[in-house]
Image (cartoon, rainbow, N blue to C red):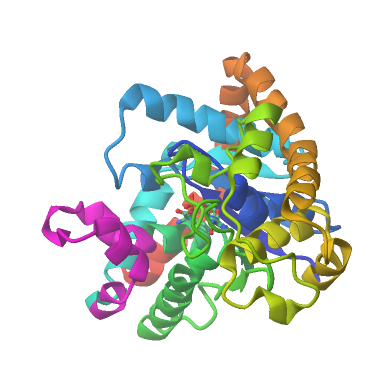
Amino acid sequence: MAKKIFSGVQPSGNLHLGNYIGAIKNFVDLQNQEGNQCIYCVVDLHAITLRQDPNILKNNIRETTAAFLASGINPKKSIIFNQSLVPAHAEGSWILGCVARMGWLNRMTQFKEKAGKDKEKASVGLYIYPILMSADILLYDATHVPVGEDQKQHLELSRDIAQKFNSDLNSPDFLKVPEPLIQRNFSRIMSLKDGTKKMSKSDPSDLSRINLTDTKDQIINKIKKAKTDTIPMPSAKEGLKKRPEVENLLGIFSSLSNQNLEKSIDEFSGKNFSDFKAILAEKVAEKISPISKEIVNLLKNKDYIDKVLMEGAEKANIQASKKVKEIKKIIGF
Ligand code: TYM
């Protein structure tokens, strides 16, 4: 069945292998499936929930767009734009914020993680961020939303908001209830330094992640230094118990080879870690280096990137502003 896809990535720097495997790689696959209509958004309004330097933010918006393009998202097939160019996102977000309940937001684990110990000092934007994310999705009648595992709770919230809006305002099926598309495997890529922590742009150690802008030498070096253990490579899935780092590395290899974990375990069973790491580093470099080179190339032509965003925003604006108009009518404005 043809799907209407919406997803977003924050332009907050350091796009990494987790973003690629958990999200962007799937954006490309979905775009290339016959009949799908895809919208991919650089969510700059989300990025300012944490303080951003204006010049760095501007660069990061272009760099995230370049990463989309370099990974294979085609502006002729998919709509690519940045959120702040389409005012309906902020407008829709206000209205949906009056539908969402405090209790729902209080349950969001990502807010608790990001706000840290001193919640009082977090921005209000960080707290209501899942409402903006709901507006992103619901304004386009998206049927499916490809994301990594860490966004699952936010997607459930957007489903709750859609259902409550429809029922409170007696408009059945008006807001489409979106389905999350979270891969069963490899939807949570972990830090190279600690297999119990998510690979993240905010980890202070650059060695914890492979950035989409890393060179081949950097990739090889980071994988060489990735944490493992002293037990031989496993010969069956049970051999991965309590070995999150090894499981993560085998998961990365499997995802980039488009094969299941069992096949990778078979391939490396009995091999030593240095041999496995050398092959893994080649595999990651083979996928990521062309993307990183293309990002550098694209960033030389800022006008082209800006044009892609502007043209995408025009198309997005037609859909989103129409939906906001309908929402306003239903509400009684
Ligand atoms: P963001 O910018 O943090 O991450 C972008 C995408 O990358 C996925 N991801 C990962 N997947 C696997 N392993 C990891 N270690 C990893 N780290 C990140 C995320 O799950 C995400 O899919 N709120 C969203 C952006 C957003 C959005 C939306 C997404 C805004 N509006 C509407 C979907 C629909 C976010 O901050 O993602």
Magenta stretch? 103-131
User: Percent from the top left, x then y, of residue 290?
Assistant: 76, 30
Q: Is residue 116 magenta?
A: yes
Please, is residue 99 above or below residue 126 in the view? below
Asked if residue 328 is positioned above or below residue 301 in the image, the reply reads below
Q: Is residue 23 above or below residue 331?
A: above
Q: Residue at x 59, y 52 (%)?
A: 18
Q: Which image quadrant: the N terminus? A: bottom right
- Residue 150 appears at what percent x and percent y? 49, 65
Kindly indicate the quadrant of the structure image that contains residue 219.
top right
Measuring from the top left, give residue 21's x and y in whole percent: 67, 54
Residue 85 in view in this figure: yes
Question: Residue 156 colored magenta?
Answer: no
Residue situated in front as seen by the camera: 105 or 38: 105
Report the predominant secondary structure element of the magenta stretch.
Answer: helix
Please tell me which residue is depicted at 30% across the width and 57% down the height of the picture. 114
Q: Residue pushed farthest left?
A: 120
User: In the depicted view, which residue is nearer to us: 233 or 133?
Assistant: 233
- State left or right for residue 163 relative to residue 227: left
**What residue lies at 51% left-to-right and 72% top-to-bottom?**
175
